[in-house]
């Protein structure tokens, strides 16, 4: 941790703070058992005092204590507890990121990782409680919106080193995922106005990770589809598909599930590849039936 912070290596630090989200799917797996032993060890030790004595004094490092507590709760299946500790970890990272005393953009990968983990454990806490109102997820929305506000209020040009706007697509995508989950799509317009308004963000897409831009375009494309703006939706979804790596088959399937119906509405029928490569047999069959004029 100290080495990552001293070297300002955000990607390494993000791996150290990330929750092992998939391990609870199989309680008999070796990975789950390893983390279970770690969680038990954390319960028996005063790791908080150890961290305070050994880590660099910084809000960037104080997140470690909360992340370890979140990990222990998560492995035990206490998703509400994991959410509470992950919330504290997120706020610690955000406090550091929001600092105006130094360039903090190196920590963007950490902010994004902790944000996504907070969203996921909030969903899991709601599912375990069978809460149809999504109490934790809605609460996380207010927490994560603070990160978006920090990014949006940064007045430095996006092409200037140290601009916090370099996180704009990543933090927006996390909020998009929650808005779609809790069906508050009307709130997405405010985010889009910030991203695509004055500030030069859309004119400098090469400065951002293409994966973040492609995901943003995917959500905007779906929103345009719901607004019956099919040509705008097609443009966004084609961009998203173009920059989604071919090995990410499930992601490409999701994009095509929206893109193919839109193109059919615009008179472009799907090729057999939709079925043979992506397994979207129903969409291909619908296209073939449309060609024959047989929609039975």
Image (cartoon, rainbow, N blue to C red):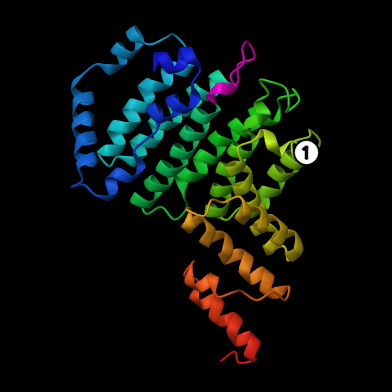
Q: Is 171 a magenta residue?
A: no
Residue 265 at x, y = what percent? Answer: 70, 74
From the viewer's perspective, is 221 left or right of 8?
right
Look at mark 1 in the image and give the residue it sits on: 203
- Secondary structure under badge 1? loop
Give the crowd class for mark 1: few <14, some 14-19, many >=20 residues within 10 Å: few
Quadrant in which the C terminus is drawn: bottom right
Q: Nearer the viewer, residue 292 or 223?
A: 292
Residue found at x 55% / y 77%: 284
Mainly helix, strand or loop, the magenta region?
loop
Residue 155 visible in this rendered orientation of the protein: yes
Residue 129 visible in this rendered orientation of the protein: no
Q: Which residues are drawn in magenta?
A: 98-107
From the viewer's perspective, is 79 left or right of 160?
left
Residue found at x 50% / y 39%: 140
Query: In the displayed structure, would residue 291 be above or below residue 39?
Result: below
Quadrant in which the N terminus is drawn: top left
From the viewer's perspective, is 82 left or right of 274?
left
From the viewer's perspective, is 140 left or right of 202?
left
Quadrant of the image occupied by residue 106: top right
Residue found at x 43% / y 44%: 120
């Amino acid at each position: 941790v100290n080495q990552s912070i001293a070297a300002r290596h955000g990607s390494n630090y993000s791996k150290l703070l990330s929750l092992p989200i998939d391990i609870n799917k199989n309680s008999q797996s070796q990975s789950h058992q390893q983390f279970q032993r770690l969680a038990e060890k954390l319960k028996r030790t005063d790791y908080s005092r150890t961290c305070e004595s050994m880590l660099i004094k910084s809000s960037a490092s104080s997140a470690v204590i909360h992340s370890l507590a979140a990990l222990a709760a998560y492995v035990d299946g206490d998703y509400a507890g994991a959410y509470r500790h992950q919330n504290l970890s997120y706020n610690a990272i955000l406090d550091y990121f929001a600092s105006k005393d130094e360039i903090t953009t190196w920590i963007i990968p950490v902010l994004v990782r902790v944000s996504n983990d907070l969203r996921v454990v909030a969903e899991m806490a709601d599912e375990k409680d069978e809460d149809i109102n999504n109490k934790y997820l809605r609460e996380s929305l207010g927490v994560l919106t603070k990160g978006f506000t920090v990014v949006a209020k940064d007045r430095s040009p996006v092409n200037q080193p140290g601009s916090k706007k370099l996180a704009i697509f990543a933090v927006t995508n996390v909020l998009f995922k929650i808005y779609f989950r809790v069906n508050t799509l009307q709130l997405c317009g405010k985010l889009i106005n910030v991203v695509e308004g004055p500030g030069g963000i859309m004119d400098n897409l090469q400065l951002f990770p293409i994966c973040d831009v492609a995901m943003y375009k995917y959500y905007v494309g779906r929103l345009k589809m719901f607004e019956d703006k099919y040509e705008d939706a097609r443009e966004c979804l084609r961009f998203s598909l173009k920059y989604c790596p071919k090995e990410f088959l499930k992601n490409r399937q999701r994009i095509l599930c929206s893109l193919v119906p839109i193109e059919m509405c615009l008179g472009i029928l799907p090729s057999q590849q939709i079925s043979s490569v992506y397994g979207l047999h129903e969409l291909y069959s619908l296209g073939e039936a449309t060609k024959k004029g047989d929609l039975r």
